[in-house]
Image: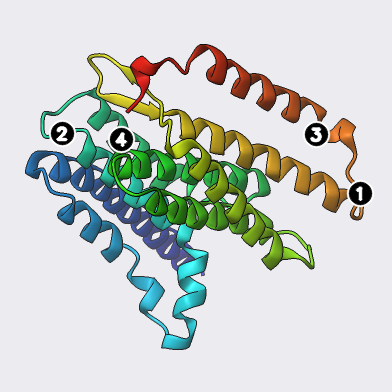
Amino acid sequence: MADYTLVRKSRNTISTFVHILMNVVLGLVSIFATALTGSWAIGVILVLVSKWRIFAVRPRYWLLNIKSNLVDLIVGLSFVLIAYCSGTVIMPVHWSLAVGYIAWLTILKPKSSELAAEAQSLVAVFLGITATVLLTANYDSLIIVITAFIIGYAASRHTLIQSDDDNFSLITLVCGLISAEIAWLCHSWLIVYTFSGTGIIIPQLSIILSVFAFVFTRVHRSIIKHDGKLKFNDVAVPIIFSMVVIAVIMIWFSKPIFDV
């Protein structure tokens, strides 16, 4: 029995190591292959292939699996598309994206706690909206509105699915609609913040929608905790903090020089 336990532990250690190694390879290859080739195709294909388990079941489960994996898909595709938008010259932004994607795959994504789910959703909103703005800033507003709806829906679903809220489906749709509305309002004045020499570009809309997602989660958690009633003391600090952040970036960091 002792020998069997030792063998089993050894196999688990090896499989864990191989799994981590494959994630590291996925993170590096998907980002740098995209940057060096100047094409998003390789990176996107690698991300989609890594999610083969979605379709490794009967077709009637595909839609449910897609919904359950939307946040991971949004994050993976966003890393690749941001790398694509960052050009073919390797810059600090590409290394940051590679490290960030590896950290997502090996550290944050495997966690399943309530706090981890909230962090995963915020990452999906921030990166998803960033990639959307960089790709569609000069296109019709309908594209960014639809994408913002999908991202808002996926992020809220990811956090709310752990709750016992009877209005789960309705709330996720409302969150998606509010995200789409905010994106539509901001589309005519898309501001981006650049950091010279690094290639890093952060859209203002990414910050605003991330703040909204953060407040939304905290408010919903308070309502569930108190049986449908909102206790302002529970959400006062997040709301005030979020209002201050949005006020600061709207008043002092919305100069036309940043306008895309």
Label of residue 97 in the image: 4
Picture quadrant of residue 8: bottom left
The CA distance from mark 3 to mark 1 is 12 Å
Q: Mark 3 belongs to which amino acid? A: Val
Q: Is the residue marked by circle 4 packed among few (<14), some (14-19), or many (20+) residues within 10 Å? A: many
- Report the side of 211 relative to 136 (left or right): right
* Residue 188 percent across, percent down from the top left: 42, 35
Please state which amino acid type lies under the numbered disc 4: Leu
Camera-nearest label, 3 or 4: 3
Q: Nearer the viewer, mark 4 or mark 1?
A: 1
Q: Which mark is first along the chain, 2 or 3?
A: 2
- The image position of residue 85, as x and y in percent, is 22, 38
Q: Could you tell me how far apart the alpha carbons at marks 3 and 2 are, in whole angstroms?
A: 41 Å
Look at the image and tell me whether residue 96 can be seen. yes
Q: How many numbered tags mark residues here? A: 4
Residue 235 — which label?
Answer: 3
Q: Secondary structure at mark 1?
A: loop
Residue 183 image point, x, y percent: 50, 43
